[in-house]
């Protein structure tokens, strides 16, 4: 199982404490308070596009897993963090502790997979991650992926979560913007069917490449 680089950010939910430091050394604030709260308005279009069984990859404390469950969708949250899984279950949703690259239930039969909150970075290789998503989906399924706003660029490399003097383990991570997702999706066997903003956030809906 992969190391949980975000473990320290799940201890509490002080939104001003935790930062992701990428290979460029730039600190990007992590919205930890949002992760621990209820599903926000921006996730509404994502929930609405999930019409069948849905896999929430990197579910964290489970706010989206819960929102999908309450919308009547069969939903499974997946996270490498035991703390994240416990928090999701405490909210009344179903979650398992697993590395998403390891065998998962119902592979090839999910109607949707979801990657929110920067989870396109999991593993540090968006192409490999999107190819994995395709393998989890049924032929007509979709992947709903949060990306960075257009023009913000993309990177892959080693990252670390820091909080004051506390530094978490180094792990592989990536970021992908709305421009770069097209090529990454194509290389992973998917195609961008739609790109939709929600507030200041951007989401891509991907389908199996023809």
Image (cartoon, rainbow, N blue to C red):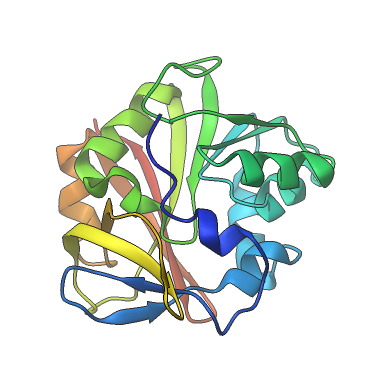
Measured along the vertical axis of the image, is residue 142 above or below residue 25? above
Instruction: Identify the residue at image location x=64%, y=29%.
Output: 53
Residue 176 versus residue 93 in the image, above or below: below
* Percent of width and height locating residue 143: 43, 41
**Is residue 20 visible to us here?**
yes
87 or 125: nearer the viewer: 87
Residue 193 seen in this snapshot: no
Please give left or right for residue 66 compared with residue 96 in the image. Answer: right
Q: Is residue 21 above or below residue 183?
A: below
Residue closest to the eye, 193 or 92: 92
| Residue 194: image location, x then y, percent | 39, 56
Q: Position of residue 144 (x, y in %)?
A: 46, 48
Residue at screen point 42% across, 78% down: 165
Residue 95, quarter of picture: top right
Q: Nearer the viewer, residue 64 or 87?
A: 87
> Which quadrant holds the C terminus?
top left
Residue at left 55%, top 63%?
Answer: 9
Residue 171 sits above or below residue 160 on the image: above
């Amino acid at each position: 199982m992969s190391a949980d680089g975000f473990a320290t950010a799940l201890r509490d939910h002080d939104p001003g404490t935790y930062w992701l430091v990428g290979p460029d050394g730039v600190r990007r604030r992590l919205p930890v308070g949002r992760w621990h709260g209820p599903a926000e308005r921006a996730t509404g279009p994502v929930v609405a596009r999930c019409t069948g069984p849905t896999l929430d990859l990197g579910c964290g404390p489970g706010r989206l897993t819960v929102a999908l469950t309450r919308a009547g969708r069969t939903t499974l949250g997946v996270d490498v963090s035991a703390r994240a899984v416990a928090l999701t279950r405490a909210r009344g949703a179903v979650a398992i502790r697993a590395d998403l690259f390891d065998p998962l239930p119902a592979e090839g039969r999910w109607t949707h997979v979801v990657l929110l909150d920067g989870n396109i970075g999991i593993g540090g290789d968006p192409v490999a991650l999107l190819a994995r998503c395709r393998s989890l989906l049924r032929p007509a399924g979709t992947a709903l992926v949060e990306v960075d706003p257009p023009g913000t660029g993309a990177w892959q490399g080693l990252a670390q979560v820091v909080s004051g003097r506390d530094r978490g383990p180094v792990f592989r991570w990536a970021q992908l913007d709305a421009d770069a997702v097209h090529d990454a999706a194509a290389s992973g066997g998917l195609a961008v069917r739609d790109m939709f903003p929600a507030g200041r956030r951007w989401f891509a809906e991907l389908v199996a490449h023809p």
